[in-house]
Image: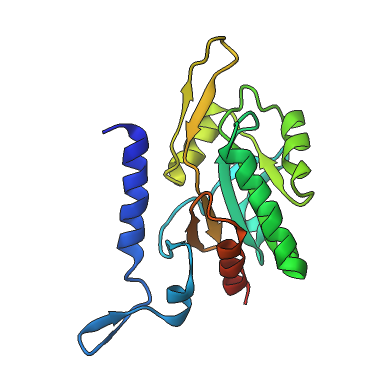
């Protein structure tokens, strides 16, 4: 079993493990609370992922989850030269922000690069806000990136290209969401469109 498959199975297993959170017994059956049952993405409430992360943004300012207290925080791991998953995810989140209207000011999207060799702060500062001026790019050194990816159980791996600088990066395609109280709540699957994300963010912000 390769590392990518193991990571996918871990996410599924984790979601299954926390599915019991907030349930009540009634007539011998387990029932989800109304809010949890209404989520359209994977409810991962109760996981202890990444709450103590610290990584510099593209301006060199160290960022932590506490910086965004009172906001829902969406964290996505990717890289600027990604040909498909990353730009479509960022465009999707930009669409989500548009559909949220005034509520968008209570959402912070963070793009964590897994390619610090090529993704310079200058490049991130152009790429990430090009989707939405409120989006922030985070870039650490290799050790910081490995630590943060490990905290979120995110997989990434360099895939060599024909030339030394033409490599690609295999990486986990989904995003994690923290609620305004700093608790991890959701795993967002890639490629489902903005509507389920808008729906779930509104629940978290209500």
Residue depicted at 48% across the width and 37% down the height: 147
Front position in the image: 30 or 68? 30
Q: Position of residue 115 (x, y in %)?
A: 58, 28
Q: Where is residue 61 in the image (x, y as percent from the top left)?
A: 73, 41
Front position in the image: 57 or 196? 196
Q: Considering only vertical position in the picture, is 77 above or below 46?
A: above
Q: How many labels does the image show?
A: 0
Q: Where is residue 167 in the image (x, y as percent from the top left)?
A: 54, 19
Residue 179 visible from this viewpoint:
no
Residue 122 visible from this viewpoint:
yes
Q: Considering only vertical position in the picture, is 184 above or below 112?
A: below
> Hey, which residue is sitting farthest left in the picture?
28
Front position in the image: 112 or 130? 130
Residue depicted at 78% across the width and 35% down the height: 126
Residue depicted at 57% across the width and 46% down the height: 76
Q: Is residue 102 left or right of residue 180?
A: right
The type of colouring in the image is rainbow
Residue depicted at 44% across the width and 40% down the height: 150
**Where's the C terminus, which quadrant?**
bottom right
Q: Position of residue 137 (x, y in %)?
A: 68, 41
> Hey, which residue is sitting farthest bottom in the picture?
27
Q: In this view, does 100 lie to the left or right of 169?
A: right
Q: Considering only vertical position in the picture, is 12 above or below 105?
A: above
Q: Considering only vertical position in the picture, is 147 above or below 204?
A: above
**Where's the N terminus, which quadrant?**
top left
Q: In which quarter of the image is residue 70?
A: bottom right
Front position in the image: 62 or 2? 2
């Amino acid at each position: 079993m390769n590392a990518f498959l193991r990571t996918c199975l871990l996410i599924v297993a984790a979601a299954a493990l926390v599915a019991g959170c907030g349930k009540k017994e009634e007539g011998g059956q387990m029932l989800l609370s109304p809010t949890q049952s209404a989520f359209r993405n994977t409810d991962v409430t109760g996981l202890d992922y990444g709450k103590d992360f610290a990584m510099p943004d593209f301006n060199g300012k160290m960022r932590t989850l506490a910086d965004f207290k009172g906001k829902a925080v969406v964290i996505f791991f990717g890289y600027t030269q990604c040909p498909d998953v990353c730009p479509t995810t960022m465009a999707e989140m930009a669409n989500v922000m548009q559909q949220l209207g005034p509520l968008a000011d209570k959402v912070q999207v963070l793009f964590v690069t897994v390619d610090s060799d090529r993704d310079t702060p200058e490049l991130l500062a152009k790429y990430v806000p090009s989707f939405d001026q409120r989006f922030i790019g985070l870039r650490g050194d290799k050790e910081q990136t490995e630590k943060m990816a490990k905290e979120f159980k995110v997989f990434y791996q360099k895939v060599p290209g024909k030339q030394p600088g033409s490599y690609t990066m295999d990486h986990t395609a989904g995003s994690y969401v923290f609620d305004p109280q700093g608790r991890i709540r959701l795993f967002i699957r890639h490629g489902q469109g903005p509507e389920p994300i808008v729906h779930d963010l509104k629940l978290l912000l209500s």
